[in-house]
Amino acid sequence: MADHHGNTGDLARDLARAVRGDVDFGVAARALTTMDASNYRRVPVGVVAPRDADDVAAALEVCRAHGVPVVPRGGGTSIAGQATGTGVVLDFTRHMNAIVGIDPAARTAVVQPGVVLDRLQAAVARDGLAFGPDPSTHSRCTLGGMIGNNACGAHSVAWGTTADNVRSLAVRTYGGDLLRLGRGWDGSGVPAAVRELVDGHLAVLRTGYPAGLPRLISGYALGALLPENGVDLARAFCGSEGTLGVVTEATVALVDTPGARALAVLGYPDETAAADAAAGLLAHRPLTVEGMADDLVPDAHGLPRGRAWLFVETGGDTAAEARARATEIVRAADALDGTVVDDAAGMRALWRVREDAAGTATRTPMGGEAWPGWEDCAVPPARLGAYLRDFRALLTGHGLRGTPYGHFGDGCIHVRIDFDLLSREGIGRFRAFSEQVAELVVAYGGSLSGEHGDGQARAELLPKMYGDELVTLFGRFKDLLDPAGGMNPGMLVRPDPLDANLRFAVLPGRPVDVVFGYPHDGGDFAGAVRRCVGVAKCRTRSAAAGGGVMCPSFRATGEEAHSTRGRARLLHEMLAGEIVTDGWRSTEVRDALDLCLACKGCRSDCPVGVDMATYKAEFLHHHYAGRRRPAAHYAMGRLPQWLRMAAPFAGAVNALAGVRPLAALAKRIGGIAPERDIPPLAPVTFRRWLREHMGERTEVLDESRTAVLWPDTFTDHFSPRTGRAAVRVMEAAGIGIALPPGRVCCGLTYVSTGQLDRARTVMRRALDTMEPLLDLGVPVVVLEPSCAAALKTDLPELLTGDPRAGRLAGSVRTFAQALEECAPEWTPPYIGRRVAGQTHCHQHAVLGVAAERRLREQAGLEGELSGGCCGLAGNFGFEAGHYEVSVACAEDELLPAVRAAPAGAELLADGFSCRVQLDQLAGRGARHLAEVLAEALEDAPEEGLR
């Protein structure tokens, strides 16, 4: 089918009339769906989010009338390009995401295609059931996408692929036919010519597929239509990648989950030795046999001796039974070393490393880029070790590097390779390697795809695997079900070349002029944006599922544009200039970034370290260059400046802020949300108090036990009690305190509003002031986590040519870190109280929380603080138009945790924003850890200290 980009206005109008769901042909909607998690990019004409099966039928009818192709899309995490398209994208995540019904007795569930796997798992877990396939993207992939790709996951050695667990499908074809696909031809709606095709080619269908291969995903599963295989039409449809029709409903099988699980972790010299051993463990009937090498494990502490590991999960009715089975595997395995992990936290931590490998592997150990393309081929498990040795030799022969990992028990290997997909020579090597590795896979009796489908990455090479006769049958099968060729053209049948439509080709060939240094991307903003590979960990709907902070705005809105991936896609298209044509002036990019809280969560939680807070600041700097900014940028972006002017008149300012009409006017002028109260100014700044306090001291400071106490803007003007408490504790610990000789500012508020020229000016002044103290080499204690994070990251990345910036960044310590470093022998007073509250998102992302956790434990402050983001996030929650999202972010984790806290629990929040949010939304006062310890010091007699 030819691509029709002609009169898209008529198409959009007709779809809007026919469909009750959402029809969006705007710049942002198209830009957000140009890519999936692959190397490929195709530009759609528009996006439709149907409400139900009738909407799907109506959309297909309109598209058919206009001759425009259709691409079904779920979570957009496909790695071979099959979730991209040039026609109309059908987005099922917005509306068609329901669990229609669950039958525990029959162990089945009926679902719509847009339901996320984790939602289904949570719904059936109460009956002790699960959907067996569980890809690493389980927190955001959809059942429709899993059916389209025949997804598998870690537990396929026990429970099989998606095709093994689908019972029936309701499918609407591009031609308008409704198919009911299950077992048998009768009542299916499938054209009789399909049965004739099968009956006429029994020999090739019986002999043309590799034998003994649990992960046979490539091509169409026409072997499922053989009479001896029960004519399983649903199985034959699985893995068709949206090329045959649109799934509108699926009945899937569920499995009984074991009452307890344990994990045998086995160490081997390298991944080939681990692969050699994997097949021998299958006789023990494990739930998983996963393999990973040391270059994908950030910290091997606690793992058995070795440079590669097998994670072999076992199940049982009881914990003792599961552990016994895991222990048996450790004893039977020919490993260097082995151990059994059966505590939930330990197993979760190991699985998180495995799940993040899909993103971690996109960076080589040296920090270079690595890409999919040969992500998931599979060979018979018994031949995996030999295959890996030859595969490594092929990599070396082409001068390429990659790190294999994955489902060793199924013979399925994931590997991302440092292809050069930017130059003509590199793309030529990509093609040559792809052709040769396809021949290697076939020589080992394997499948070009063992999990993620063929898409554009491998479909061109299917004749090497299946031969021309069987591939010709694939084409005839497609033509019988989709004679107009309207379903996802360019995939599987008559595919686009594997080196066409590469997503990098549209990016500028020369570095873009930017302000930040992007040291981890060679100073190239396009390289920074390229970091996003689309695995979409940012699209999880709870912080617990994502394992951290990222991405609070997506969890609040559910909109792709408000995810880290969505924003990265829009920036990619801004640089490409094809859809987003107005560059830094783009309103679409601005609007998507508007709800970015700059929490920095993606900097740590994104597997590839996308740093959207920095990209947002960069964009705002260029977007508003030479133009009037929003009022909030002047009011809150220049907050340190206004606070210095207001400090001498704090009492009068507070009194005026208490007059409602005046406060309302001030908020309207300043672009502040009317729902917010303006925090009162401190009558005496912390800096003034500290200067007077230190003026009374005469002792000589010991540099080994001295720290500079940074008077950040928030502590100085809003919360000096926090600073006074920190001084009390540091003095009790015997730490000498030095004060910067002049006024200093980290520049945070200027950075967060994109006023980067001003930020650099402020930062240079701070460096000039701090230079004599930097020469002492002592720690710089910053009580406000957001300011500490700005000094650690924004300062050296904005002032890349100033060596003092790196020295100051390296000197920054949190309050707890400084106590450990300067007074390691000091023990805090024992408080013995439960805690609740918030870990500041910048502390989570940049500074780390280990020292704070140890300090709380020493003080007997029991329990964990909330993750996620409080939702205030500095100026974000105060800006007009952000209040509802700010509250929604707080309701994600923080407010429920505080409400659930036991009576008498100590509320902790080291961040000023977090404390303000709790005060204004929950009416609860939280304190910095320093305040709690200082109070305990005042209350406890000397002998009470331990």
Image: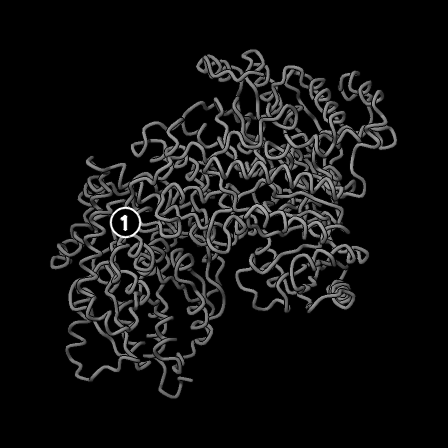
Q: Is residue 61 above or below residue 866?
A: above
Q: Is residue 897 above or below residue 514?
A: below
Q: Quadrant of the C terminus?
A: bottom left
Give the colour scheme shown: one colour
Residue 369 image point, x, y percent: 48, 47
Query: Of the residues shown, which amino acid type is indicated by label 1?
Result: Val
| Nearest the eye: 712 or 581 | 581
Classify residue 61 by image quadrant. Answer: top right
Q: Which residue lies most toward the bottom here?
A: 943
Is residue 6 rendered to the left or right of residue 174? left
Residue 424 image point, x, y percent: 47, 35
The answer to whether residue 730 of the structure is visible from this angle is: yes
Q: Quadrant of the N terminus?
A: top right
Q: Which residue is mark 1?
A: 751
Residue 697 image point, x, y percent: 18, 81
Q: Which residue lies most toward the front here?
A: 397
The answer to whether residue 683 of the structure is visible from this angle is: no
| Nearest the eye: 946 or 225 | 225
| Nearest the eye: 403 or 325 | 403
Classify residue 916 by image quadrant. Answer: bottom left
Classify residue 766 by image quadrant. Answer: bottom left
Is residue 229 rendered to the left or right of residue 116? right
Secondary structure state at the residue bearing disc 1: helix
Q: Is residue 321 above or below residue 673?
A: below
